Amino acid sequence: MTASTDNASTAAKALAAAGDHDSARDVAALDGAARGVERKLAATRRGLVERLVYGPAPTLVELRSGAELAQRVAGSQRGIVDAALGALARGEAFTADAKLSSELRRTVAAEKAFGYTVPAGFGGAGASYGRLAAVEEALAANGLGPLAVEISGQLTIGAGSLLAYGDEQQQRTFLPLVAEGRPMAFGLTEVGVGVNAKKIQAYVEQQADGSYRLFAEGPANKLWITNAVHGGLIGIVARVGKDAPGIGLFIVELPGADVALDAAHDYEFRCEPSRVAAFVANFNSRLHFRNFPLPKGSRIPADGVEVLFYCLRMGRCMLAAMAAGYQRMLARDASHYARLRSGVGGPVIRHEVPRLNLGKILGGALQARSLAYLSLQQDADGVDLAGLRDLTKTAAACAGVESMLAAEHVLGGRAFHGGSRVNEARVNLHLFGVVEGEDDLILMGMVRDVTQRFVERYLSSLLGVIDGANQAPDGSKLPAEQRILRIAVGTVVREPVRSLSAVARLLAQSKFWHLVAWVIGNALADLVRLPLRLLPASAFGRYRALPAPLRGYARYAERKLRMLRWSYLGLSLFYQLELTRAQIPLQRLGKCMEHLVSMLAICQHAALGDETMRQVAALQAQLLQDKYRSLRLFSGLRAMQRTRRAVAAVGASLEAGRCSLIDDIEPQAFGHPWDEQAADKRRAP
Ligand SMILES: Cc1cc2nc3c(=O)[nH]c(=O)nc-3n(C[C@H](O)[C@H](O)[C@H](O)COP(=O)(O)OP(=O)(O)OC[C@H]3O[C@@H](n4cnc5c(N)ncnc54)[C@H](O)[C@@H]3O)c2cc1C
């Protein structure tokens, strides 16, 4: 797919118009997979974040629905968790080299943990994802985060992909195995390809009998594949034909041991530890396939990247539930220490800064939990999760890392004690920012999703007009250095004819006048609302339903979210086509949405909690408000432009390989070099 097709999203078209054809192609390809997911889910309501920004405001019932789900599922997870904790107490949960033990796996498999959300007809427990979130949170909270990671992978992207996209035969064959506890992995990432999923190089060749042969060699080896183990199951993503555009997904049972080419085998297979120093208690592998046989019927009838995107939405909710659990565990151990330990002038717990750190950890846990359950209930209610699923993940992952730092400041040296669960949580909490989508990329994608409808309805004509200004008289595109990306006073002075004719074309567009009408209508609506700000929050039924200390925060969050529609319009008018490259403002806007939606979710969640939960909510809402206020968008445009110029300069010198601070240091060779020819000859660590 190219960005120039009519089907490309506005974002891809804008990138192409700005001359960034590589990004346009990549974005268009990924958008195609995302649109497939939208069609499959067929949401009946627009995303919550979009409605919070552009209206109509969601009802109180909807905002509360996550907290109600959390209440309904609380305690339902005891069977699995008690079994796992029993194994932990008996010292059987981990092996001597700190891996999850087979005893633990057997114990929880007997409770149907690995088939928890698999329908009973396939041997699973048929539980909802809401109940799974309760299991995930409880395991992580009690020092069994690695088991939570394993079960989440097994059920969100493993069983999840089969349930949503597998045919009847595939479901009947593989789901009972999954439910029994056979590990199931999903293999997309390759040595040479990470976030740009559509670029994978592994491929299959179809055979005359309908079976396939899989080739994933060298840089196309599948890398960092969680749950991939000899004898396990895997959904493997590969091109359907070498260099072919189509990307398929194949379900296969991996051999019980490595296979070398010999008289008995015409194929090669290797599964070796990836040596990653995160998820260390789990299986995590690098997989090599040469001429590997995939039986007829192993192809799942779907695009592999689409399946990944489909499953990621539940993966992100589970990650947030795990992050909530991990942070509760940190808060428990750090507060216990602070109560027992004497610092300067009495127990550590008596001092304000350690208390702030403990409050931050608890607040992070509440934030991750409230967003996880809200997302899950929204999904169950048929609401489009675009926006919410993304900020749920980024908020949970960021809070997890910040809580880790806070725990270190309370626990001091013991936070690093080998074998302590706090120490062991560190790398996984860091990794949460990278897996299931890297946080910053997700935030920028979220802004696109939330604003997409507005852009298509009101701004696309503006972008089209600038695109037109960059056409040569013969219809070809002007060279990059002559292109106009935004029309401002300086451009009019430099390029008066092109700029003014673009403005004239803009004024002739009906969409431009729709935008003017939108601006007037929304400005009037805000004007009418203005006097209402004099009334206290308790004057509105919507906020009266909240405990008094939380009302102001919920109201603030909703008001500021509405104001973000102006911020986005302002940024769009200021940057115009350049916004396609202006990642810093987009990332900041995403952060603003993340902080404000988190504030709102926390307040609604704590409204159904006890007094101590409300105290935590009030503190976290205040801390989030402080963070939001420190992020200036339109009001800080000049400073942001200075930052962007400085970033551009530093980036350009690094790109050119010149920076005196590092010029005299040899870079270290990477693990898993991705271009075997050009790879550094030195041994990778
Ligand atoms: C422990 C572990 C478990 C994993 N489990 C699995 C698994 O089970 N299955 C699986 O398929 N994969 C798995 N992954 C892979 C994981 O999803 C990838 O690490 C991730 O997709 C990023 O790929 P990468 O590390 O190669 O980063 P790269 O693709 O090399 O990207 C490097 C950085 O550049 C940034 N970047 C790239 N392009 C842009 C841009 N246009 N703008 C701004 N920033 C950009 C990225 O966000 C990233 O931060 C796992 C990884 C780890 C470490």
Image (cartoon, rainbow, N blue to C red):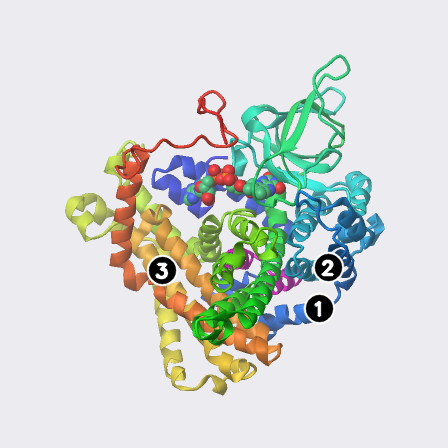
In three-dimensional space, the C-alpha distance between marks 1 and 3, rounded to whole angstroms, equals 42 Å
Left or right placement of residue 439 versus residue 179 in this view: left
Quadrant location of residue 340? Answer: bottom right
Magenta stretch, residue numbers = 371-399
In three-dimensional space, the C-alpha distance between marks 2 and 1, rounded to whole angstroms, equals 13 Å
Residue 412 pos. (x, y %) = 49, 60
Front position in the image: 619 or 669? 669
Q: Amino acid at mark 2?
A: Ser
- Residue at figure coordinates x 37%, y 59% from the top left: 568
Is 610 placed above or below 578 here?
below
Is 405 placed above or below 204 here?
below
Are circles 1 and 3 on residues that touch, CB within 8 Å? no
Left or right placement of residue 181 versus residue 419 in this view: right
Category of crowding for the residue at label 3, using alpha-carbon neighbours closer than 10 angstroms: few (below 14), some (14–19), many (at least 20): some
For label 1, the residue is 74
Foreground: disc 2 or disc 1 = 1
Residue 381 pos. (x, y %) = 65, 63
For label 3, the residue is 569
Residue 270 pos. (x, y %) = 67, 27
Of label 3 and label 2, which has the lower sequence position?
2
For label 2, the residue is 128
Front position in the image: 503 or 683? 683
Are circles 3 and 2 on residues that touch, CB within 8 Å? no
Left or right placement of residue 292 versus residue 602 in this view: right
Is 49 placed above or below 254 here?
below
